[in-house]
Image: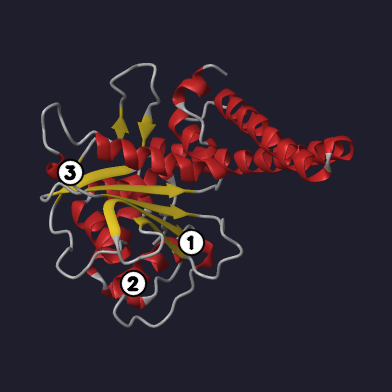
Amino acid sequence: MKYLNPRADLTFKRIFGEHPDLVISLLNALLPLKAGEEIREIEYLPSEMVPDNPLRKFSIVDVRCCDVKGRQFLVEMQMLWSPEFRERVLFNASKAYVRQLDAGEGYELLQPVYSLNLVNEVFEPALDGYYHHYAMVHVEHTDHIIDGLQLIFVELPKFTPHTYSEKRMHVLWLRFLTEIGESTRVVPHELLEAPEISKALTVLEESAFTDEELAGYEHFWDGISVEKTLYNSARREGLAEGRAEGKAEGIAEGRAEGLAEGEAKGKRLIAANMKKSGIDPLIIVQCTGLSIEEIERL
């Protein structure tokens, strides 16, 4: 049996955007939910959050859904990390939160928004853990929390399998996301024994996709490879420019400004090249952090 990589845009959305039981299992396994807060049912919501004002920013996530309590869940698979991605996550979660109410409705109707972000790169090298949970907490009394927004980032490369203890599905889903791919020939029995993972594996079988879908799948990976190469080149260029300017204006300031300017320039160059290659604009958004409007202007 040959499988595709579950981290690709096509496969990730197929698994978690079309099978409610699978996204429920993933969310219950990876979100910081207390006992009794588990998700039972979900309803898929449009992944695109179109602004009321056309001059405002357009938002899109991989999977968006809500449960019977009204809690919203945003799920993203991010192949390449950029500093702007964290801001985009906060922006999207905030937009989902504030758009819950219509005019005249009371604030007591507001429900929490959870944003689960699976990142295929290490972005916190100074921290040992792979699981990062951000919440609004009292600075001095951290047990006092405002539940409106919960942001979770998972650094997939840092994850290593460990004993199940009480987090069996947490471990199994992360093993599925990090171990299964095109080179998989034998699936670990632990994954096959979990009904949800077994179903996800069936969805991932290459034979389940059309030739057109497989071509798009390959195109996605080509785009990721190009984007990573260009991004790294732009970053090096920005660092070099920053160092040069730093000799005249102060090394620290020149390095920071040059790097930031180089990265911004690099993102625009990357997006322009991906656009010329015919890559889906939504994939360009995911890879670069630029908005649809910015990409259209290139």
Q: Secondary structure at mark 2?
A: helix
Q: Quadrant of the C terminus?
A: top right
Q: Earlier in the sequence, mark 2 or mark 1?
A: 1
Mark number, residue 135: none
Kindly identify the residue that appears in the image at 29 percent across and 66 percent down.
29
Above or below for 204 versus 45:
below
- How far apart, in angstroms, are the residues tagged by discs 2 and 1? 17 Å
Which kind of residue does numbered mark 3 sit on? Leu
Q: Secondary structure at mark 3?
A: loop
The residue lying toward the viewer, choosing from 91 and 74, is 91
Q: Earlier in the sequence, mark 3 or mark 2?
A: 3
Q: Position of residue 39 (x, y in %)?
A: 17, 59
Q: Are marks 3 and 2 in contact (CB under 8 Å)?
A: no
- How far apart, in angstroms, are the residues tagged by discs 3 and 2? 37 Å
Mark nearest the camera among 2 and 1 is 1
Which residue, given by chain and number where applicable, does mark 2 sit on? 191
Q: Position of residue 275 (x, y in %)?
A: 55, 25
- How far apart, in angstroms, are the residues tagged by discs 1 and 3? 32 Å
Which residue, given by chain and number where applicable, does mark 1 sit on? 156
Q: Earlier in the sequence, mark 1 or mark 3?
A: 3
Quadrant of res 195: bottom left
- Is any atom of residue 92 visible in this view? yes
Q: Are marks 1 and 3 in contact (CB under 8 Å)?
A: no
Which kind of residue does numbered mark 2 sit on? Leu
Quadrant of res 108: top left
Mark number, residue 110: 3
Kindly identify the residue that appears in the image at 27 percent across and 58 percent down.
27
Which kind of residue does numbered mark 1 sit on? Leu
- Is any atom of residue 218 visible in this view? no
Q: Position of residue 232 (x, y in %)?
A: 69, 44
The residue lying toward the viewer, choosing from 195 and 273, is 273
